[in-house]
Image (spheres, rainbow, N blue to C red):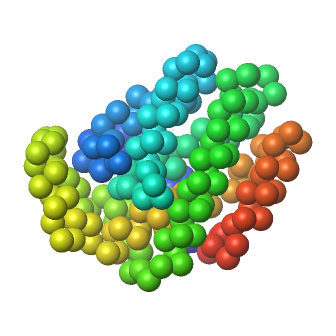
């Protein structure tokens, strides 16, 4: 991983991301900031479960990742770090840590599946994902979006592979911090998680 990409990932703010112009499995990422805020608070179990479902269902569907997914993974990595830290004292954090570890394993599998296929090189920079040419319209129009999906190359090849590549780079950027917070209870799952990482987990 380049230092430029690592710095971008670790300094990115929710407000820096034009979520309403990023695709998800069921539309746009407009509601991502609200869902991420609920998870970050780790207070209301029902609200956390609902927000987690909304996020994960929109970030991954049948092994397909979307434009919002790499950005979602940046903030879910930070939330996982906090959840691991508080898991011993906060039952909601404990629940969330376990659920996020499962989701991260799913994202890892998606990355491996995409990497095994013939693919373009990823965009050089994580920030390239937000180039104007890749963003969808400012105003959401369901019919217009559906028409765009009918185009032969709705996502350029390098952009599409970048959904997978940078989703995993987002996790790698926080690997060291996450490892410091893993409790003995979650340690076996954490080791198994990275054991399944194969060659794609090198932090380069």
Q: Residue 155 in the image: x percent, y percent?
A: 26, 66
Q: Residue 34 in the image: x percent, y percent?
A: 41, 28
Residue at the right extreme, as displayed: 184
Quadrant of the frame with the N terminus: bottom right
In the displayed structure image, the side of residue 150 where residue 30 appears, left or right: right
Whether residue 136 is situated above or below residue 150 in the rendered picture: above
Q: Quadrant of residue 27?
A: top left
Q: Quadrant of residue 157?
A: bottom left
- Look at 23% across and 56% down and name the residue there: 135
Report the number of numbered marks. Answer: 0
Q: Residue 178 in the image: x percent, y percent?
A: 71, 49
Quadrant of the frame with the C terminus: bottom right
- Look at 44% across and 34% down and name the residue there: 54
In the displayed structure image, the side of residue 86 where residue 108 appears, left or right: left
Tell me if residue 143 can be seen: yes
In the displayed structure image, the side of residue 26 where residue 113 appears, left or right: right
- Look at 15% across and 66% down and name the residue there: 151
Whether residue 69 is situated above or below residue 150 in the rendered picture: above
Q: Residue 148 in the image: x percent, y percent?
A: 15, 58
Tell me if residue 121 can be seen: no
Instruction: Report the front residue among 34 and 66.
Output: 66
In the displayed structure image, the side of residue 180 where residue 159 appears, left or right: left
């Amino acid at each position: 991983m380049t230092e430029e990409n690592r710095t971008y990932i670790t300094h990115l703010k929710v407000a820096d991301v034009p979520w309403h112009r990023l695709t998800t499995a069921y539309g746009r990422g407009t509601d991502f900031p609200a869902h991420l805020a609920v998870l970050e608070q780790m207070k209301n179990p029902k609200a956390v479960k609902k927000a987690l479902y909304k996020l994960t269902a929109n970030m991954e569907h049948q092994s397909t990742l979307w434009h919002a997914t790499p950005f979602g993974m940046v903030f879910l990595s930070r939330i996982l770090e906090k959840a691991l830290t508080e898991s011993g004292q906060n039952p909601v954090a404990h629940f969330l840590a376990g659920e996020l570890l499962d989701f991260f394993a799913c994202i890892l599998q998606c990355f491996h599946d995409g990497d095994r296929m013939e693919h373009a090189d990823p965009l050089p920079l994580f920030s390239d994902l937000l180039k104007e040419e890749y963003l969808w319209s400012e105003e959401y129009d369901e019919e217009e979006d559906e028409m765009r999906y009918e185009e032969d190359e709705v996502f350029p090849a390098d952009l599409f592979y970048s959904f997978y590549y940078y989703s995993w780079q987002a996790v790698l950027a926080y690997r060291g911090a996450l490892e410091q917070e893993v409790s003995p209870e979650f340690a076996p799952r954490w080791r198994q998680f990275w054991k399944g990482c194969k060659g794609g987990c090198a932090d380069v």
